[in-house]
Amino acid sequence: MEKLLVFGHKSPDTDSIASSIALACLQTKLGKTAEPRRLGNISKETEFALNHFKIGAPELLTSVSEDDNVILVDHNEPDQSADNIKSAHIYMVVDHHRVNGFETAEPVYYYAEPVGCTCTILYKLFNQNNVTIPADVAGLMLSAIISDTLLFKSPTCTDLDREVAEKLAKISNTDINSYGLAMLKAGTDLSSFSEEELVNLDAKVVTIADKIKAKISQVNTADIDDVMTRKAKLEEAMNKDVESLGLDLDLLLITDIINSNSQAIVLGSHADLVEKSYSVKLENNTAFLEGIVSRKKQVIPVLTSHAE
């Protein structure tokens, strides 16, 4: 087989980048030619992890063609993937999200589990193939689990995520709590980002109940009020996306990683879906969502259930 390109979703988070690097490493050790790629800019949190473990960022990939052999990690939905993804040959998928709109012309290796992080699944794949995980890659995989589970506080976190994190910490000689807090705090420094960048740092476009095109973005912070001082300009950036992407709903979650709550800014013709889903009233396009921190478990399925 020709070279495999391994990449996660657009607006990549730490799991998307770490999974791409880890799976490319595994495939290479299994005798294949595989290279990690990214579909967007690196966040400060991910940059912190890459620098800490001295791993370079993957090259940027903008689109694929029918000549490309690819592996998808941390996603499966075409709208979240590389441009022209349906024309490429998909060799494998490793994911921990819902399956939606995914189809291939040929059989495919598909590994998916309802865990908190793709790297948790990848740890098992390394073991199943009797491949030792390099210390630096193990540290990056640990970073992904810490990120996706908000240091095990997210409702998406499972016992397996915690177990794998402990093993990766031992391989990489990393103190989970001290390193994890430092990494998460690095990701909350939003001062250098424009409002357009903020609403696209960690964003996913999804179709809810087969009828509502929604963009759900999330930024982590230690101070919600600090981010909300930029509300007017954030709304300007969101309105541009509503127009350019033809969105029915644009939802930005400003998530407090210390207290595990989120402030939501909501725009679009279906903004009332958020009110209905969480029994809140939007005031000036905003609502406080107590205890809501997970887009995958507490937002997308909740919006979907109330849209039907």
Image (cartoon, helix red, strand yellow):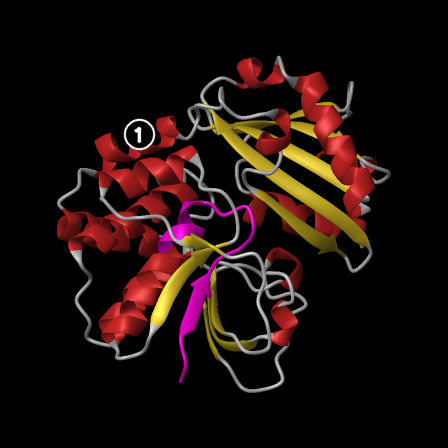
Residue at screen point 59% across, 77% down: 66
**Which residue, given by chain and number where applicable, does mark 1 sit on?**
181
Is residue 13 inside the magenta stretch? yes
* x and y percentages locating residue 174 in the rendered image: 17, 41
Name the quadrant containing residue 81: bottom right
Does residue 214 appear left or right of residue 268 in this picture?
left
Residue at screen point 49% across, 24% down: 190
Residue at screen point 53% across, 42% down: 294
**In the rendered image, which quarter contains the C terminus?**
bottom right
**In the rendered image, which quarter contains the N terminus?**
bottom left
| Count of marks, rendered view | 1
> Where is 259 relative to 100, above or below?
above
Which secondary structure, mark 1?
Answer: helix
> Where is 52 relative to 300, above or below?
above
How packed is label 1: few (under 14 Cα within 10 Å), some, or many (20 or more)?
A: some
> Where is 262 relative to 75, above or below?
above
Name the quadrant containing residue 164: bottom left
Residue at screen point 40% across, 75% down: 3
* x and y percentages locating residue 210 in the rendered image: 79, 60
* x and y percentages locating residue 292 in the rendered image: 56, 35
Name the quadrant containing residue 279: top right
Of residue 227 and residue 301, the one placed in the foreground of this image is 227
Q: Read off the magenta span.
A: 1-18
> Where is 296 relative to 275, above or below?
below
- From this viewpoint, is residue 265 visible? yes
* x and y percentages locating residue 33 in the rendered image: 33, 75
Instruction: Give amino acid for label 1.
Output: Leu
- From this viewpoint, is residue 289 visible? no
Is residue 122 inside the magenta stretch? no
